[in-house]
Amino acid sequence: MRKKEIIIIISLLVFWGCAAYLTRDNKGSGEDSVLQPIIGGELLVSSKGGYHSVEIYKLENMLIINAESETEFFDDTQLTVETQGDISPEDIEIIWMTIGGGTEETENNDFIIAEIKIYEDDELIFDTKINFIKKAIEAIGEAFENE
């Protein structure tokens, strides 16, 4: 059992490294993006972690979160958060994490998770994590299940 777990972990890391390397500068035209255009919105925060980016726009009483990746194994994502008061960039925190949960990016340990926290009147109103390689991990898991 232990040997199988080690093989799975090594396979995941090799697959993720190869996929990241092959898609590093291969963003494409964006034709397949599911993100809806934001007309009249104010960009509050923009953050980039390795091959991935998060942008947060303010549109009336709503925040729109766009998460995009240069890799092929992440479908661009758009989330919305309703607000009651005024939200400023200081009320938004984006924390980038590696596969091990660290917040320091290294040559062999890229950022793969963005945790987004939004505060309104010093109260946490939104806290979510976006996993940019979840689809790749699920595909590898399914491949091992089928063996």
Image: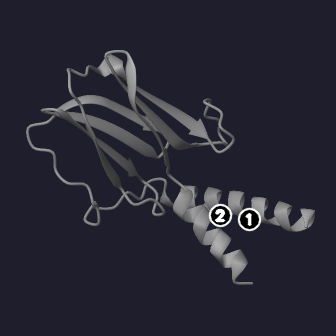
- The residue to which callout 1 is attached is 11
Quadrant housing residue 13: bottom right
Q: Residues within 10 Å of mark 2 (few under 14, many from 20)?
A: some
Residue at 48% x, 59% y: name it.
23
Residue 39 image offset from top left, x and y in percent = 9, 43
Gap between marks 1 and 2 measured at Cα: 6 Å
- Callout count: 2
Secondary element under disc 2, as helix, strand or loop, is helix
Q: Nearer the viewer, residue 100 or 15?
A: 100
Residue 50 left/right relative to 139: left
Secondary element under disc 1, as helix, strand or loop, is helix
Q: Amino acid at mark 1?
A: Ser
Quadrant housing residue 140: bottom right
- The residue to which callout 2 is attached is 15
Seen from this angle, which residue lies furthest left?
40
Q: Are marks 1 and 2 in contact (CB under 8 Å)?
A: yes
